[in-house]
Image (cartoon, rainbow, N blue to C red):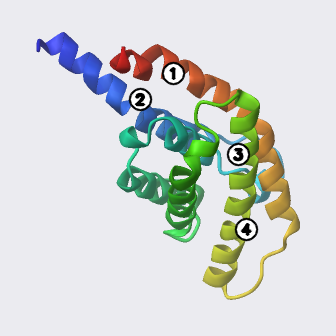
Amino acid sequence: MELGQRIQSFGRVAAPTATTLFIALVSVVPFGIPGYGAVAPSLPLIALYYWAVHRPDLQPYSVCFGVGLFYDVLIGSPLGIHAFVFLVCQWLVIGQRRFVAGKSFVILWWGFVIVAALAAILEWAAYSAALAHPMPLEPVAFRALMLAAMFPLLGWGLVQVHRGIVHQEDG
């Protein structure tokens, strides 16, 4: 295999991790909206979900864990909270992917709505445990709704990456 083919093959294999890390970085761009940090959705979960459904072989648990730690550092949360939340969600999605893989985008989205709700509950429990007092539920619910609402846009972008880069490897 020549160098160009190796680079192209590496790009296909690295695309899921690269898109997930890119979304993590974009999610911390300051918008200048007062109080946004308290309700900012965990956007990397969208990419983690998408790749767990479509290409779990290209985004193993170790990557999921690393993305969670990276995201915790980016947003300044207690280290390990998002690694835990992302790992639990990925484990559940991979175990249940037969219900959404290969189905319509609407079914994929509804599956994500369930995962976003679960992730919000897990985040709330983890933050409450880490801070030794229950956190308010309203921001958690709002974050889950925002995350579910943003899935079509980011999911569409991930579909394009999947079709244009990653899927070439299968052909």
Residue 120 locus on image (x, y percent): 72, 62
Mark 3 and mark 2 lie on one chain; the one further toward the N terminus is 2
Residue 38 shown left or right of residue 79 in the figure: right
How much space separates mark 2 and mark 1, taking CA atoms? 8 Å
Q: Quadrant of residue 109?
A: top right
Circles 4 and 2: CB distance less than 8 Å? Answer: no
The residue carrying mark 3 is 111
Q: Residue at x 59, y 66 (%)?
A: 77
User: In this view, which residue lies farthest toward the right?
Assistant: 138
Q: Residue at x 75, y 58 (%)?
A: 117
Circles 2 and 1: CB distance less than 8 Å? Answer: yes
Of discs 3 and 4, which sits in the foreground? 3
Res. 57 visible in picture: yes
Circles 3 and 2: CB distance less than 8 Å? Answer: no
Q: Which numbered dot is residue 161?
A: 1
Residue 96 locus on image (x, y percent): 58, 52
The residue carrying mark 4 is 121
**Secondary structure under badge 4?**
helix
Mark 4 and mark 2 lie on one chain; the one further toward the N terminus is 2
Decide which of 168, 12 is in the foreground and name it: 168
Residue 7 locus on image (x, y percent): 23, 19
- Relative to 11, say whether 14 is above or below: below
How much space separates mark 4 and mark 2, taking CA atoms? 29 Å
- Relative to 38, say whether 20 is above or below: above
The residue carrying mark 2 is 15
Q: Residue at x 21, y 13 (%)?
A: 5
Q: For mark 3, does the 10 Å Cα neighbourhood hold few (<14), some (14 to 19), or many (20 or more) residues?
A: many
Mark 1 and mark 3 lie on one chain; the one further toward the N terminus is 3
Amino acid type, residue under disc 2 in the picture: Ala
Q: Residue at x 74, y 87 (%)?
A: 133
